[in-house]
Image (cartoon, rainbow, N blue to C red):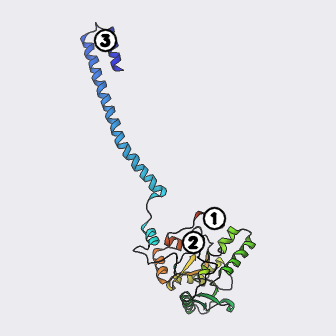
Amino acid sequence: MVRDRFEERKTKGKHRSARRQRQRFTVLLMAGAVTLCLAGAALAYGLWGTNDTHDTDQKTATAAGDAPASSETQNAATGGDNTVAADPSSGYGQLVNRSHPLKNAETYEPDDLVEVAYAYNGNGQLLRKDAAEAMEALIAAFKADYPDLPIYTKSGYRSYALQNTYYTNQISVYGDAYEAATISAIPGTSEHELGLAMDLTIDGSLTAGFEETTQGQWFLAHCNDYGYIHRYPKGSELMTGIIYEPWHFRYVGKEIAADMAAKNVSTLEEYYGLYLDAKDIDNYVPFLQ
């Protein structure tokens, strides 16, 4: 554009002075210098801007959840250096929930079930042998501290058929299968069917008020020492898919219980890094909040 003007002026102003020509030449030099500066700035921006954009994309991806799992989660899920060898699919640490049902649930029955002492109203409750011995030792320790306070075993091992009875009863009470499943697990997905879970009671009832009692607070504080965990803690309902149950204790063995306590991990889902599938939690959320 500057050159066009120069040619036009050259045609019309042949008689202009040499001074004017020198001025035009100076203008052209300045324009060229400006153009070179702008081109250099554009090139620099292109190089630096690309890197900035790349960095921003990486930060956005990390914020969106593309960053690798924490070392604790990886260790828990894979049996890393800071985690005892634990198998979520078998043994005392087995994970059972709606996304991880018990295999052959309809016919499964542990072969080492024994009766547990301290049963409410003398109704014998069963657990697997190691779990039963640990529960009796746990209750005996409580009795040593509080000999006059009552505590009983209420509900231990359940067959698939018995669990189905509990579940269908809750459906008849609440009129909604999803809500019922947050209170009494769908048969095939209950820890009671493993023979490793026990509900404790003071007077035969199972209520949230148990947490406020001396018994409830003592068992929450000491269960890990005997290989038990409080399986359905408050605030973890969306992880477990089950309502808060301060009375429900699950035997996992001393190693896993101690490891979970050391990591301050509350649920087996967190411990293994294995969470409920969307289909097994989405429709249950309204009843867990």
Mark nearer the N terminus (2 vs 3): 3
Q: Nearer the viewer, residue 99 or 42?
A: 99
Which residue was labeled with disc 3?
10
Secondary-structure class at tag 3: helix
The answer to whether one can see residue 147 in this image is yes
- Tell me residue 12's x, y (percent): 33, 8
Instruction: Specify few, some or many for label 3: CA neighbours under 10 Å numbering under 14, 14-19, or 20 or more.
Output: few
- Residue type, numbered disc 2: His
Q: Nearer the viewer, residue 215 or 139?
A: 139
Identify the residue shown where x is 54% and y is 68%.
275
Mark-to-mark CA distance, 1 and 3: 83 Å
Query: Do the residues under discs 2 and 3 have CB atoms within 8 angstroms?
Result: no
Mark-to-mark CA distance, 2 and 3: 89 Å
Above or below residue 191? Residue 64 is: above
- Residue type, numbered disc 3: Lys
* Quadrant placement of the N terminus: top left
Which numbered mark, 2 or 3, is in the foreground of this view? Answer: 2
Above or below residue 161? Residue 150 is: below
- Residue type, numbered disc 1: Val
Above or below residue 124? Residue 272 is: above
Instruction: Specify few, some or many for label 1: CA neighbours under 10 Å numbering under 14, 14-19, or 20 or more.
Output: some
Mark-to-mark CA distance, 1 and 2: 18 Å
Question: Count of labels shown?
Answer: 3
Q: Nearer the viewer, residue 61 or 148?
A: 61
| Residue 100: image tag | 2
The answer to whether one can see residue 267 in this image is no
Which residue was labeled with disc 1?
285
Query: Do the residues under discs 1 and 3 have CB atoms within 8 angstroms?
Result: no
